[in-house]
Image (cartoon, rainbow, N blue to C red):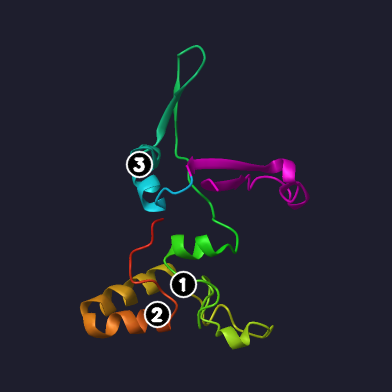
């Protein structure tokens, strides 16, 4: 198995995004590599992109600075939970997006907005809990959060 991503262009209409021909695999590293090491090796390129890329016209008379970004990561693969810093979907709270209990996964009335996992809220809670080292790991595990910082 190769480690990588599947790229789907967000600018396509839904019917085109769902076609296999519009899903592009991007391989980042060979089987057996640690995903954190792969991301670390790509970090200089990511940093350059965050600062913008200059593109010159064919004639060389003008330049344009572009700022590419990743709009969203989609999917429900267990590896994506790990990449985001969460436990697998079999955990008591295994959803990356909300705090739904595993026994309530069929509840169509569940309020995802009120009980959502919001990035900065989770980040701040995690930092506060890590200061109380003795209780941190059990609390994080109970909430379905990995104690290590996420790779992405």
User: To which residue does mark 3 refer?
Assistant: 41
Badge 2: residue crowd in 10 Å (few <14, some 14–19, many ≥20) = some
User: To which residue does mark 1 refer?
Assistant: 87
* Quadrant including the C terminus: bottom left
Q: Position of residue 40 (x, y in %)?
A: 34, 46
Alpha carbons under labels 2 and 3: distance apart: 29 Å
Which residue is nearer to you in this view: 49 or 86? Answer: 86
Badge 3: residue crowd in 10 Å (few <14, some 14–19, many ≥20) = few
Q: Earlier in the sequence, mark 2 or mark 3?
A: 3
User: To which residue does mark 2 refer?
Assistant: 141
Q: Earlier in the sequence, mark 3 or mark 1?
A: 3
Alpha carbons under labels 1 and 2: distance apart: 8 Å
Q: Position of residue 125 (x, y in %)?
A: 33, 77
Which residue is nearer to you in this view: 148 or 16? Answer: 148
Q: Which residues are magenta?
A: 1-30
Which residue is nearer to you in this view: 26 or 29? Answer: 29
Residue at the (50%, 79%) spot, across then down: 91
Residue at the (35%, 39%) spot, across then down: 51
């Amino acid at each position: 198995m190769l480690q990588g991503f599947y790229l789907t262009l967000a600018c396509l209409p839904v019917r085109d995004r769902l076609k296999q021909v519009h899903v592009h695999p991007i391989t980042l590293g060979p089987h057996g590599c640690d995903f954190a090491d792969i991301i670390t090796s790509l970090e200089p390129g990511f940093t350059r992109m965050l600062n913008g890329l200059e593109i010159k016209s064919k004639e060389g008379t003008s330049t344009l600075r572009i700022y590419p970004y990743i709009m969203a990561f989609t999917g429900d693969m267990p590896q994506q939970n790990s990449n985001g810093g969460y436990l697998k979907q079999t955990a008591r709270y295994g959803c990356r997006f909300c705090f739904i209990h595993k026994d309530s996964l069929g509840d169509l009335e569940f309020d995802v907005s009120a009980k959502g996992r919001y990035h900065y809220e989770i980040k701040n809670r995690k930092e506060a809990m890590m200061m109380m080292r003795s209780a941190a790991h059990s609390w994080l595990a109970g909430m379905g959060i990995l104690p290590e910082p996420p790779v992405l």
